Image (tube, rainbow, N blue to C red):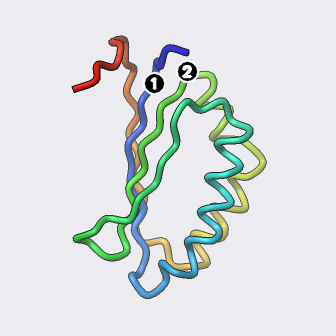
Amino acid sequence: MKAKVAVFGILRFPPDNISDVLPHLKEFVDQTQKHDACILYEVAEDLTDPGLLRFSEIWPDRASLEKHLVAPHIKPWREQAKQYGLLERSFDSYDISSTAISV
């Protein structure tokens, strides 16, 4: 499947809350990968900035991304994020047209 949309973003939590956030985040990512037609959906904690989570997403089209944003598992995840002290949220999406090249 050819990718059409890339999303990169961050969430920031108090560093002391990350261990409590991760089980809820894992459930959210699992549900996204299972139900939302994403090509790639990855999250990683920044190694040099405690409490910062980085997201990389690849979607087949903008419609799939828009469906994801209103999927049933979004609301519970966002509520959990607030409960654990979400400090910052920033996501940007990009339309892409080239094919990936291995380097």
Residues at badges 2 and 1 in contact (C-beta under 8 Å)? yes
The count of marks equals 2
Q: Which residue is mark 2?
A: 60
Q: Earlier in the sequence, mark 2 or mark 1?
A: 1
Q: Which mark is residue 34?
A: none
Quarter of the picture holding the C terminus: top left
Give me the residue at 28% from left, 68% from top. 47
Where residue 70 appears, as percent x and y from the top left, is 70, 41
Residue furthest out toward the bottom: 16
Where residue 36 appears, as percent x and y from the top left, is 68, 35
How many neighbours does mark 1 have within 10 angstroms: few (below 14), some (14-19), or many (20 or more)? many
Q: Which mark is residue 5?
A: 1
Q: Secondary structure at mark 1?
A: strand
Above/below status of 90 relative to 63: below
Cα–Cα gap, marks 2 and 1 = 6 Å
Q: Is residue 100 toward the left or the right of residue 48 in the image? A: right
Above/below status of 47 relative to 10: below
Q: Is residue 11 toward the left or the right of residue 103 in the image? A: right
Answer with the quarter of the image where residue 24 lies: bottom right
Give me the residue at 35% from left, 67% from top. 52
Where residue 96 appears, as percent x and y from the top left, is 37, 18
Q: Secondary structure at mark 2?
A: loop
Could you tell me the amino acid type at mark 1? Answer: Val
Give me the residue at 37% from left, 27% from top. 94
Could you tell me the amino acid type at mark 2? Answer: Pro
